Amino acid sequence: MVTRSHKGVKPGHEPLFTNLAVGDLDHDGRQWIVGTSSSGRVYVWDSHGHRRPGWPKALNTGVSKPATPRPAAPFTRPPIMGATSPPVLADMDGNGTLEIIQAGWDGRLHVYKPNGQNLPGWPVEVTLPPGTTPPAGNVQINDHKLDLPPALAQLDADPQPELVQRTQYSFTPGAGLQVLAGKSNAVAYNADGSRVSGFSLSASALGIYYGSAQEFITEGAANLATADVDGDGKTEIATAPGIFSPAALFNANGSQRSAYDPSPLPSFLGVVGSLAAIQATLQGTLPTDIPVNFTTSGAFGNFGGGLSYTEPGSGAAGVAASLLLPGSGQPIRNYARAFPAIGGAARSGFPAKQQGLDFLGGPAIADVSGDGQPDLLIGGDSSALHAYTAGGGQVSGFPKFDTGWEVFGPSVGDLDGDGRNEVAITTREGYLMVWNTPGKASADQWWAFRHDERNTGQYGIDTRSPGVARNARIQRGELRFKAPGDDWYTGKVKRYTVRITKANGSDTEVVPPSGGAGTVQRVDLPPHFRRVSVRAVDDAGNVGGWETVR
């Protein structure tokens, strides 16, 4: 952040490069925007860009000025003020309002009420469970920073959500690139800030690299994604450890349940596992190029015949050849992947080739073809936005071409309320691009990098409020209006709340809908009222904004 004036430079502004979050913090139908700067401050603005009182909040709990010169502290990174994680919005205490959850470089998970006060029990210093030690021959990387956001989860039978947080407390045999070694760890906390009893997620990696210039990348950058894949009411967790490793599915207690096959290990060994393999690689002969995770994150959604886990990937054979045999001249190929959510072999038609590495990105799953079936959208660093059908082919009209690296991933939604999806992406070069599609807004499954506008990372949660009643008017003793939907202007709301103001007070009625989005709704009115207001409520309890007529 620039703090001193220079010619042509105005000081005091902070970079915001992670996802914003949008949500109805007060449960009154008004949307708020939450953003976190890399300098380590959390901001809240209303829909007109005015900052909310009580904000920003600094992520500096337990941070102290380092000694000069800094002492030698191998495998240690102390807490500092900063953030690379986007904010997450969730109702943590069950009172209907949304708390703001923020992982910081100060090593804490912060949970704030909408007014900026700490929720009781928070912040929490994120640590590994007591008694956790590295495997024999390994050391723990004591990196206090929390680089990634927590994922919302339901790990037990209580109604409050839990938070699953990937830590930078990884295990490695030593400095430098370690192959077929390393472990990544995640922890979980209850809504009151206590540790989830018995939860321990420690996943073995195919590679980890301590001491690089981008430790956030080379020690693992895969976000956690959660979904109830078996219908038991508890969420499972999908992620990939370290770097160049396959994704796996973990149970609600953190134990591994299954893997998304096949293992890329034969690809690695087929390149550098023997002298003959190395010689074949140098002559241009590569083994099967099984995709692996590299800086990408995944998404759950109803795609390709059922609930699926999808994720971009890079070919293991090409990765091994280019990194371990840099003179081989072998390219790294990139792929879109889709698996049954419960694990196992890829769905038919996948992996499918894509242009460019989706660096630090993840997919969206929504209809962009117009057939009402979800499609898989993946961006990348080479100016192409792909959309795949359930069979692995390209949706007609895709790929879309833009100006460079598409940061984090596409977002999908009905921007103009016509029932059809638009697709938006932002490039590193600073361009925001939006395309119209014939896709039906009712088929959105995972519509943003972290699933939704609240950045929850949890499949199946309803974060989209109903729209506002349109064309509201009084006609022949009735309130008439064009119905919104339960998700903006798509679907059918659960009910309407109608507030009728008279000279001697007001009455409130609950009115069921007579039809879905776009239909004309009619509500009988008593005589001698002053004004009438209406708003919609959906199945999840999300409320739309009030519309008032006189």
Image (cartoon, rainbow, N blue to C red):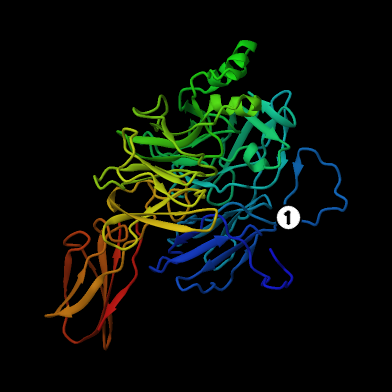
- Crowding at mark 1 (Cα within 10 Å: few <14, some 14-19, many 20+): few
Q: Residue 90 location, x and y as percent?
A: 47, 55
| Quadrant of res 497 | bottom left
Q: Is residue 330 left or right of residue 545?
A: right
The residue tagged with tag 1: helix, strand or loop?
loop
Residue 500 occupies quadrant: bottom left
Q: Is residue 227 left or right of residue 496?
A: right
Q: Position of residue 62 (x, y in %)?
A: 73, 55
Q: Where is residue 473 drawn, in percent x and y?
A: 20, 78
Q: Position of residue 107 (x, y in %)?
A: 67, 49
Q: Observer-nearest residue: 412 or 21?
A: 412
In the rendered image, is residue 155 in sight?
Answer: no
Residue closest to the eye, 199 or 548: 548
Image height check: is 357 above or below 105?
above
Query: Which residue sits furthest top?
Result: 276
| Residue 523 appears in view | yes
Quadrant of the drawing holding the N terminus: bottom right
Pick the quarter of the image with the C terminus: bottom left
Residue shown at 33% from the left, 48% from the top:
444
Q: Nearer the viewer, residue 121 or 211?
A: 211
Query: Is 386 in front, or is 497?
Result: 386
Q: Is residue 133 above or below residue 278?
A: below
**In the image, 110: left or right of 177?**
left
Q: In the image, what residue type sits under mark 1?
A: Gly
- Reading the image, the residue beneath label 1 is 62
